Amino acid sequence: MHRTAAVLAAFLAVAVAACGLAPDAPYTDVTFYWQFQDRAGNRFGDFTAVNPGCGISGAGGIANVDHVRVTMNGPAGPILLTVPCVAVNGMPGATFTAVPTGPYTWTLEGMRVGLPVFIAEGTGTLTNFPAIDVTMLAVYPNLDLHYDWPLGGSCAGVAEITFELDNLDAQIVEYSSRNAFVACGAPYGFTMPSIPVGNRYRFPFVRAVDRAGFVLSQACGGVGPLVQPSSGTSATAHLMQLCP
């Protein structure tokens, strides 16, 4: 199947001149496509625009990666570019142009709010317009959130579970329902892949809402703080009909 990605120009003229390469040295375009895998073996994305696995809800879930940092080391020296995880045409990938042919090593890092949370490394000889599928592996363990219902509560009328996970140490929103859709239903929980360890976290809110965004039930006072250990952890949100 023919696939395309957004073309990002790699301006290598200065590097080529510095390395003494001949002006007529052969060049090629290099395309990377990516998906992500957590430590439990779950994969996010299938290298297509239908299910990119980055930060758009798909059949395989999402990794919550906003950018990918690509580092290639080859005949012209290091090439370093950071690109959106999803290209303008919806593909999880990017094309780099005018890359000198030859042997390379490369590192791809899936970034979340500036922090690498997935990584992959590879080697190969780049010639003849290669397209390379890469599976980036989680740097950190998962964090799971479970929720339970008040007496008589259920998913009836619930369109979505909304939430936010705050990293108290980094003072950032680590994960949220703004970029991760969570449907209501068994097993009444969800997984956030590759959450940095050793930091304190808190869920300021976990809510069951209807299609209009009206809160039907919620966890009063939030959940946390909790610390993400090296083996991963889980938390439980106790939803209530009304909060004081």
Image: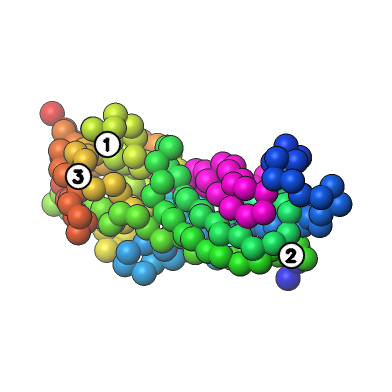
In the picture of the structure, the residue carrying the numbered disc 2 is 127
Q: Is residue 30 visible?
A: yes
Residue 234 in the figure: left or right of residue 40: left
Q: Position of residue 173 (x, y in %)?
A: 34, 35
Give how far apart the Cα atoms at labels 1 and 3 are. 10 Å
Q: Is residue 60 above or below residue 222?
A: below
Give how far apart the Cα atoms at labels 3 and 2 are. 43 Å
- Residue drawn 81% across and 50% down? 22
In the picture of the structure, the residue carrying the numbered disc 3 is 198
Q: Position of residue 44 (x, y in %)?
A: 46, 61
The amino acid pointed to by label 3 is: Gly
- Category of crowding for the residue at label 2, using alpha-carbon neighbours closer than 10 angstroms: few (below 14), some (14–19), many (at least 20): some
The answer to the question of whether label 3 and label 2 lie on touching residues, with beta carbons closer than 8 A, is: no
| Sequence-wise first label, 3 or 2 | 2
User: Which residue reaches farthest front?
Assistant: 20
Q: Main secondary structure of the magenta part?
A: strand
Q: Position of residue 157 (x, y in %)?
A: 36, 49
User: Which residue reaches farthest right?
Assistant: 24
Q: Which residues are magenta?
A: 65-88
In the picture of the structure, the residue carrying the numbered disc 1 is 167
Q: Is residue 122 above or below residue 151?
A: below
Q: Quadrant location of the N terminus?
A: bottom right
Nearest to the eye among marks 1 and 3: give it: 3
Nearest to the eye among marks 1 and 2: give it: 2
Nearest to the eye among marks 3 and 2: give it: 2
